[in-house]
Image (cartoon, rainbow, N blue to C red):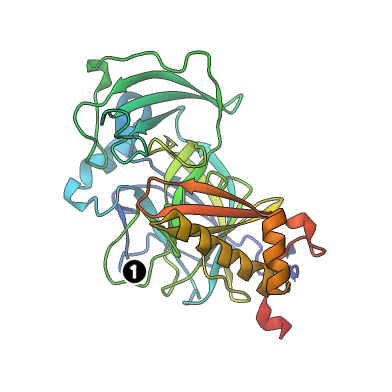
């Protein structure tokens, strides 16, 4: 089978060669960090498919609804002292044969299915309005309807104390449950909040902030049907997934999305024919560029400059034309404000370009 690459060419090397199953176990996850020395949980070739389990670190918010024996084992066997410096359970890493620094991993997300039919939203101490809510933390448990692809709140409770330990287990049958959001239905948008490659830093890098390696981007558009491009930083790429969500709005203002475990099917393609400075998202109709910084203004500038790179180097526009186009046709949004490093995303319609917005390799056009 020949498939169209992001350069617009016909390629045979993207044909699915093998299907791998990667279960989440204490031996195949790393909790709270990326690190180039983590032993690969799986080795794949370019074009291989992977069915991987992504486990939420919030399953303990409703353990009777969101935990099964395999999840209980992860929570029981990974010591709290080894869940740092971040909070997310990462499945992997996956070693991609032939991947070298400077390459790109093209990750085609094909399917994301909830592991069970419940998820949790936490209004957390890192939420944007924590002070305004009197430093109260509140959990809302949502029920998922797979037939309608929607979610409704089942109950809520005030979290006792401060939510500090990744993988906290709360026995809410013993707490005061309250009704929440009666009559309200929200669309389910399963996606990965966190995914990426290992940074070229010989220490644990927290999963909480996003960065050039990917990480906790928290863009709800990174779901089934989307393709992400991650810049490889170490040999093999060492790609991991985690922080699964079933719905989130731009901003993620309370501190979390609806956190719920997912089974994720994706294809990894090694790309040596183009490069990009930051994680790049392709949907059916748009290109989406991400910018990160502790200051939202600087995050906005970083996103603008990387979109400028996309338009000039890959669409061959002049800088002046690209700047004008961004102002009249690109949409900027706040991805999230709760991960320490803030996120801005900017999307532009691929259909406005004569080539349907394919990523072109500037080196081939010289």
Q: Is residue 253 above or below residue 8?
A: above
Res. 279 visible in picture: no
Residue 363 position, x and y percent, is 66, 82
- Say which quadrant the C terminus sits in: bottom right
Mark 1, other Cα within 10 Å: few <14 / some 14–19 / many ≥20: many
Residue 68 position, x and y percent, is 34, 32
Secondary structure beneath disc 1? loop
> Residue 357 or 49: which is nearer the viewer?
357
Q: Is residue 64 above or below residue 37?
A: above
Q: Is residue 274 above or below residue 173?
A: below
> Residue 98 or 89: which is nearer the viewer?
89
> Residue 148 or 251: which is nearer the viewer?
251
Decide if residue 194 is on the left or right side of residue 69.
Answer: right
Q: Is residue 227 above or below residue 249?
A: below
Residue at 42% in and 75% down: 235
**Residue hosting label 1:** 36
């Amino acid at each position: 089978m020949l498939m169209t690459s992001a350069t617009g060419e016909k390629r045979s090397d993207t044909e699915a060669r093998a299907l791998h199953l990667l279960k989440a176990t204490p031996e195949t996850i790393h909790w709270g960090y990326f690190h180039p020395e983590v032993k690969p949980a799986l080795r794949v070739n370019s074009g291989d498919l992977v069915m991987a389990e992504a486990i939420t670190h919030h399953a303990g918010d409703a353990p009777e609804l969101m935990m099964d024996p395999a999840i209980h084992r992860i929570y029981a066997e990974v010591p709290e002292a080894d869940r740092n410096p971040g909070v997310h359970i990462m499945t992997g890493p996956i070693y991609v044969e032939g991947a070298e620094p400077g390459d790109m991993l093209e990750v085609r997300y094909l399917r994301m299915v909830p592991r069970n039919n419940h998820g949790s939203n936490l209004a957390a101490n890192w939420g944007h309005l924590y002070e305004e809510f009197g430093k109260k933390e509140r959990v809302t448990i949502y029920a998922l309807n797979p037939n309608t692809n929607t979610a409704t709140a089942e109950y809520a409770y005030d979290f006792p104390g401060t939510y500090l330990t990744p993988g906290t287990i709360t026995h809410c049958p013993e707490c005061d449950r309250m009704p929440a959001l009666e009559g309200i239905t929200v669309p389910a948008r399963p996606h990965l909040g966190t995914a990426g490659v290992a940074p070229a830093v010989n220490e644990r890098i927290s999963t909480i902030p996003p960065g050039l390696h990917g990480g906790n981007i928290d863009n709800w558009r990174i779901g089934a049907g989307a393709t992400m491009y991650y810049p490889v930083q170490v040999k093999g790429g060492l790609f991991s997934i985690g922080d699964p969500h079933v719905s989130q709005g731009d901003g993620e203002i309370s501190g979390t999305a609806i956190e719920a475990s997912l089974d994720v099917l994706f294809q990894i393609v090694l790309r040596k024919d183009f490069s990009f400075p930051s994680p790049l998202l392709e949907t059916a109709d748009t290109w989406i560029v991400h910018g990160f910084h502790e200051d939202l203004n600087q995050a906005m500038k970083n996103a603008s400059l990387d979109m400028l790179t996309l338009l000039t180097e890959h669409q061959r526009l002049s800088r002046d034309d690209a700047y004008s186009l961004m102002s009249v046709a690109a949409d900027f949004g706040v991805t999230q404000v709760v991960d320490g490093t803030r996120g801005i995303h900017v999307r532009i319609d691929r259909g406005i370009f004569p080539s349907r917005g394919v990523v072109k390799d500037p080196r081939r056009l010289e």
